[in-house]
Image: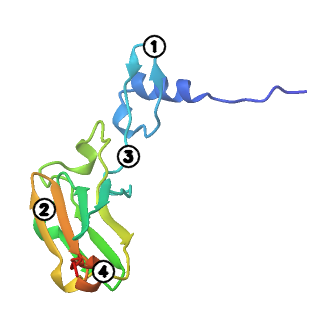
Amino acid sequence: MEPLSWTPREMEAWRAFEEGDLPRYSGTYNWPFGKVWSRMSPIESNWTPKIEVWEKNEGYSVRAELPGVKEEDIEIFTTKNTLTISGTRRPSPDVEEDEYRRCEMCYGPFTRTISMSPSVNPDGVEATYENGILNIFVPKSKEAIGRKIEIKSK
């Protein structure tokens, strides 16, 4: 019986390294002295920005981390009970895809949809963007905020 022939990933990486073909090697191998090659097309991966949502009496505040996203590449949509943030983070136009030796950042389109109470006022939504942080305030309707009732003495 003939033994099975196989080439472990380590040998593939080493062979690519020896042949000077490491930029074409698309695998990952943790050498004893650390990772020497990791490559994924910067356009291939989807990403989802991190968000925070909190509620106060007047409305909801949403904060989204969007580092590297230009303001003109962000869109915000509201409906009666949802808030949707979408956009695109683009790779640097100064770097060609075949020039990357390590790319851990994600690029491409993203969408986040947040459910809200149906008592929000979508017409009063305000948004600011500074230093890669998007801040959105979604006010509650006047009926949802309610009002304090004063007690009168007799």
Q: Residue 144, which numbered label?
A: 4
Q: Which is nearer the eye, 21 or 96?
A: 96
Q: Residues within 10 Å of mark 3 (few under 14, many from 20)?
A: some
Quarter of the C terminus within the rendering: bottom left
Choose mark 2 or mark 1, whichever is in front.
2
Which residue sits at x=21%, y=59%? 90
Counting the numbered discs, the total is: 4
Q: Which is nearer the eye, 124 or 134?
A: 124
Measure the C-alpha gap from mark 2 to mark 4: 35 Å
Indicate the amino acid at tag 4. Answer: Ala
Q: Residues within 10 Å of mark 1 (few under 14, many from 20)?
A: few
Report the residue marked by disc 1.
Answer: 32
Figure coloring: rainbow
Report the residue marked by disc 3.
Answer: 40
Which residue sits at x=37%, y=71%? 113
For the residues bearing labels 3 and 1, Cβ distance under 8 angstroms: no
Q: Residues within 10 Å of mark 4 (few under 14, many from 20)?
A: some
Can you say whether 95 is above or below 35 in the image?
Answer: below
Q: Residue 70, which numbered label?
A: 2
Mark 2 vs 4, N-terminal side: 2
